[in-house]
Image (tube, rainbow, N blue to C red):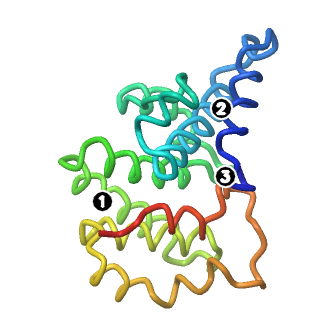
Amino acid sequence: MRLGNYEKAGEILHQVTQTNQAKLLDKWQTSQWYLWEGYLYYALLRTEGQKNVAQLAPRYATVQLPEFDAYTQLLAKDKQGYQIQVLILKTFLLREIDKTLLSHHTKRLYMYNQRHLTNAIDTKTSNFFRMIANAAAVDFDSAKTLKRVNTMNDTLTSPDHFLERQELIPYHRLWKMIKID
């Protein structure tokens, strides 16, 4: 997925989840795999379109929000940085699936930002999270979003920044996938 070959990533993810060892994973590990599947679904949706997602990777043809919440609930309490990935992905999914819940979710983004990122070191992950929160706050309106996030956007593609552990898909690619209206 980090290389942008989402169709191949879907094939590999499907093969891995069908092995006998996948059935032995505990709930926390299953949650991690579900997060990967969610990012894969979003990447396929934004790059291929809904009809093609169903053809390319039928297992990932849709993501149901209640199921997503149930599977990623364990990751919301971890100390390894997955909570921020869950919040980012949920923002993307709400934008695609149910925009009516986006404003409530935006409040959660700001609360997370205030509690955990206000005094944080400027990392790509924290900057990207702030960009997503700003974009969601103005309902992904292009003029308002670009004005608010212009300076942070430079950090996504800076040669000084390497891929962070939490970057399931490189942030500069995810930002392009958003296609702000």
Pointer 1 local density, CA inside 10 Å: few below 14, some 14–19, many at least 20: many
| Residue 168 image label | 3
| Dot 1: element | helix
- Residue that label 2 marks: 33
Pointer 2 local density, CA inside 10 Å: few below 14, some 14–19, many at least 20: some
| Residue 97, position as x, y percentages in the image | 30, 41
| Residue 167, position as x, y percentages in the image | 67, 58
Above or below, comparing residue 76 to residue 70 in the picture: below
Q: Nearer the viewer, residue 69 or 145?
A: 145
The amino acid pointed to by label 1 is: Thr
The amino acid pointed to by label 2 is: Trp
Q: Look at 81% across and 14% down and name the residue there.
A: 21
Above or below, comparing residue 158 to residue 171 in the picture: below
Which of labels 2 and 1 is toward the front? 2
Mark 1 or 3, nearer chain start: 1
Mark 2 or 1, nearer chain start: 2
| Dot 3: element | loop
Q: Look at 54% across and 78% down and name the residue there.
A: 119
- Residue that label 1 marks: 106
Q: Quadrant of the C terminus?
A: bottom left
Q: Are marks 2 and 3 in contact (CB under 8 Å)?
A: no
What's the CA distance linking mark 1 and mark 3? 22 Å
Above or below, comparing residue 117 to residue 71 in the picture: below
